[in-house]
Amino acid sequence: VTPEIFQKNPLSLVSNEMNTLAINIMSLISSGHPTLNRVTSYYFEAEGKKVRPLLVLLLSRALSAIPVEQRNRIAIDEFDFSNDKKLAKIPGIGSLFDLPLNNISPLHVLHGIKPLNDLTKMASSFPEVDFDKERGILPKQRRLAEVVEMIHTASLLHDDVIDHSDTRRGKPSVNSTFTNKMAVLAGDFLLGRATVAISRLRNREVVELMSNSIANLVEGEFMQLKNVAIDNDVSYITDGGKKQLPLPTGKLDLPVHDYSVPILSNNLSHQEKVDLAFEYYLHKTYLKTASLISIALRSTAILSGANHQVIDECYEYGRNIGICFQLIDDLMDFTVSKKDLGKPVGADLELGIATAPVLYAWREDVSLGPMIERNFSQPGDVKKATEAVHKYGGVEKTRKLAEEYRDKALKNLRSVLPESDSRSALEFLTNSILTRRK
Ligand code: FPP
Ligand code: MG
Ligand code: MG
C-alpha cells in the first residue's frame, strides 16, 4: 500500500514500477535460510515512504525527455550477441525496444553510442524508428531504484541497533522483534546482495559511485557518533587529508574540512564555534542522508547517457533535496508524536545528538555549549535544551534553512530537465518534503 501523500496524481506516473519494486527486491534478497529471509524481508513488507526509489524512477522518466542529440553518450543497456539479429537495448529510446544493429562494434558496447555521429547514421538506416518518441525507464534504472532502497534499508537495520530504537515504519523494529545480532547480519546481507546487483549494472562509474555511497553512510554515522567539532577531548590522528578516495568525477565528495586535525581551539569565539559545529553538522548530514540520494540520482543520469552538466545538476539536486529531507527529519524530532512518526521521537537529544534546532538555540544561548559537549548526559540537560530550542525558534529557523535547500533543489531540476509530467512530479515531491508528517 502506498502512503497517501504519494497516491496523489503526479506520482502515479511510476506506480507500476513502484508496485513491482518490492517483488523484485524480494527476489534479489532470497537466501537459503528461512529466518534470514524473514528478517531481511521484514521492512520491505512495511509501509516505507520509498522516497529514494521514487526519485530514481521519476528522474529516469524526466531524463528520457532530453532529446538524444543533447546527450553525451547513449549507453547500450543490453547487447545480445547470441542470435543473428544482434539486439541492442538503447536507453532513452525505449526500454523495451530492441534495435537491430548490423554494424555495432564491441567499442560501442563499451563506450556507448555518440548521438550525433553513430546514432544519426543508425537512424537513417532505421527510418521506422522515432528516436524521440520511444521513451521510458530503463531496466538498469529500475534495478538502481531497487538497490538504493536495499542499501537504505540495510542502514536502517544498523541504525536501529545503534539508536536502540524499538519501532520503525510503524511496527516493532527488527532488533526488538528478532535480535541485535540478526539485525546487524541482515543489514550486511542486504548490502552484499545490493553490491552484486550494482556490479551487474556493468557500469564502472556507477559501481564506484554507489560503493562510495555505502562508505559515506558509515562515515556520516561515525561523525555523529563522535562529534570532533564539539568534543575537545578527542586525540586526533591525521593522515594529511588523504582519507578521501579520488572519484571519477573530480570535485565530488571532497571533505569540507579535514576533521582529522584538531578543529576546536580555545581561541575561537562563540560565533566561530557555532559556525564550525554547523559546518560539521551539514557535512555529516550530507554523508549520512544526502549522499545516497545524490549519488543514486547522479547514477540515474549517467545510465541515461546524459551530458556532464545534466549529471552534475542531478547530483546537486539529490544533495539539496537530501539535506532538506534530513533537516525536516531533525526538526520533526521536536514536533511530531511517536504515533504519527512511526518511530521514537525526542530521540536525538536522548542519544546525545545536537541537530540544527539545538545549534540554532546554542547560537543565542552560550550555556548550551557544555550540555552539547557532554552529549546531554546530565539530568535536566534534555529538558533545558528542548526548552531553549522552543524559546529561540530553533524549529522555525531549521524549517527556513530546509526551504533554502528546497529552493536550490527546484532550481537544479529546472535548469536541465525539459518540462514534462515527470519533472512536475519531481517538483511536487520536492515541495512535499516540507509538509510531510512522517
Ligand atoms: C537514520 O538516521 C540513519 C541513517 C540515515 C544512516 C545510518 C547509517 C549507518 C547506521 C551506517 C551503516 C550503514 C550501512 C549501509 C550498513 P536517524 O537515526 O537520524 O533517523 P531515524 O529517526 O529514522 O532513526
Ligand atoms: Mg535512528
Ligand atoms: Mg541514527
Image: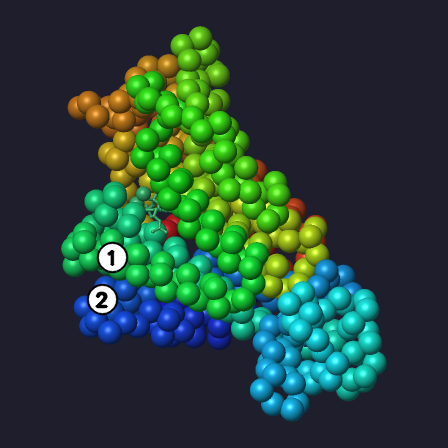
Disc 1 within 8 angstroms of ligand 1 (CB):
no
Q: Residue 22: in sight, yes or no?
A: no
Q: Amino acid at mark 1?
A: Leu
Q: Position of residue 282 (x, y in %)?
A: 47, 34
Q: Nearer the viewer, residue 60 or 91?
A: 91
Q: Position of residue 112 (x, y in %)?
A: 68, 67
Q: Nearer the viewer, residue 81 or 385?
A: 81
Q: Position of residue 347 (x, y in %)?
A: 27, 39
At x 42%, y 65%, the residue is 196
- Helix, strand or loop under label 2: helix
At x 54%, y 45%, the residue is 319
Q: Amino acid at mark 2?
A: Leu
Q: Residue furthest front?
A: 106
- In the rendered view, how is the structure colored? rainbow
The residue that disc 2 covers is 36
Q: Earlier in the sequence, mark 1 or mark 2?
A: 2
- Helix, strand or loop under label 1: helix
The residue that disc 1 covers is 185
Callout 1 touching callout 2 (CB < 8 Å): yes
